[in-house]
Amino acid sequence: MKLAYWMYAGPAHIGTLRVASSFKNVYAIMHAPLGDDYFNVMKSMLERERDFTPVTASVVDRHVLARGSQEKVVSNITRKDHEEQPDLIVLTPTCTSSILQEDLQNFVNRAALESKADVILADVNHYRVNELQAADKTLEQIVDFYLAKARKYKTIDTTKTIRPSVNIIGSFCLGFHNQHDISELKKIFRDLNIDVNLVIPGGASVNELKELPKAWFNIVPYRETGLMAAEYLKKEFSMPYISTSPIGIIETASFIREIQAILISQGYTVSFEDYIHQQTKFISQSAWFSRSIDCQNLTGKRAVVFGDSTHAAAITKVLCREMGIHVSWAGTYCKNDEQWFRSQVEGLCDNVVITEDHCLIADLIAKTEPSAIFGTQMERHIGKRLNIPCGVISSPVHIQNFPLSYKPFMGYEGTNQIADLVYNSFTLGMEDHLLELFGGHDTTDALTGTLSVENQLRWSNEALQELGKIPGFVRGKIKRNTEKFAREKNLLEIKLETMYEAKETVGA
């Protein structure tokens, strides 16, 4: 545990709440101190929901510290069971409430005796896992619970559907363009004459989970949440699954060919090659765009990529293989997925970065000086400070990345969205000229080579005035070269004379 004012992935209980609140008629109770219940506000604001978020906090206060939590927790569970009449109530502790070391499983067992709904305790270690890992584990736990219940009461039917069918695992709230991606996946399956059996948790009822084994196969579009449930279904019911994310032309084609291979292995003769060809040639404008003069202008430009493992790996592949853009480094904050991430981007970028430290990422971006950044909302903030354009490609994000219009990242329509995002994220020659002509650069403070406060140099007023006279399209380079010269000379302040010395020495 560490104190932080920014986290790429939140605490474990947020992941549990994201999964629980994504199911239909499931209620979550959070055993937490006042202040940890910001999830309700965050979800209702970002998802623009009309209904109340099905989450209640069982507040840890001074009375709980004095007498214990059992009476309060049990009372809150039974009260919500009576008021909301849910199918399932999930109790989740937080790091703070876990300090009390109370037997919450005993509380759940007692509440279950007095409730009509099923009651379970989220089985995650809140000190060792983050938001995404907890979401993955919670989804698997709920799937396991209801399939075991169906087996016990002999209500499970493992007979496969007559037509090919699929389960989509991992559609949950607060995901990056999640609902748009799921809609695009459904469109692909409809075009391929494959029925969608269930989408979980995405609005599904927990009572429908017993229908999961009927599908021919499963797909996990986001490896951060859904892999554990897919592995469980593979182990218990021999259901194959696909974890390739159909982001970009090449990966979308690979995704469809994997589906084809699974169907053929189950005795269903099919070929999707014509579909791939037609979609690539006529639906996706990205393939045409990659051969246009506009895209050729991007060839050789340098970019950096950072985000969750799914999106960071996918965008790195698109930039390198489909658009000819040089990726200086690619990184992810999903440290638990390091091995997979490295295997995906190996050979596509100069360096790989695995970290949860946004300050390190900020300094790396400043030192790399890329033409564009593709990252999370934090990298967008960093880019604004460095005057480097940024395309947001991964959570965590702000409300502008929960668009009302249709903007998937997956499938063939997603390739168009990504092509637009990439192209519009670069400041091209004519745009840079117009910005300079109309004073766009002159309204921006000078850049620094690092964002760490302790490494920043002081500039005298005379030096700043001289810097302001330099054309905007080279001002950043001259400033960085001057600061590099000053650091080599161990100077604490850059004066007008320092600029002239730097120019003579390094040709700034």
Image (cartoon, rainbow, N blue to C red):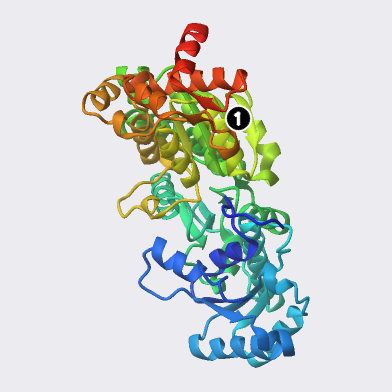
- What residue sits 73% from the left and 90% below the top? 67
Q: Residues within 10 Å of mark 1 (few under 14, many from 20)?
A: many
In this rendered view, identify the residue nearer to me: 82 or 265: 82
Q: Nearer the viewer, residue 39 or 246?
A: 39
Query: x and y percent of residue 391 in the render?
Result: 41, 38
The structure residue drawn at horizontal position 53% and vertical position 36%, both measured from the top left corner, is 451
Quarter of image, res 106: bottom right
Residue 303 % position (x, y): 48, 27
Q: Is residue 467 left or right of residue 438?
A: right
Residue at point 41% right, 68% down? 44
Does residue 63 appear to the left or right of 422 in the view shown?
A: right
Circle 1 residue: 345
The N terminus sits in image quarter: bottom right
Number of numbered markers: 1
Q: Residue, x 54% and y 38% (percent of image)?
A: 306
> Whole-percent x and y of residue 166?
52, 53
Q: Is residue 68 visible?
A: no
Q: Is residue 15 above or below residue 477?
A: below
Residue 423: percent from left, percent from top: 35, 29
SS for callout 1: helix
Residue at far left of view? 438
Compare residues 242 and 359 and report the one nearer the observer.
359
- Amino acid type at circle 1 is Val
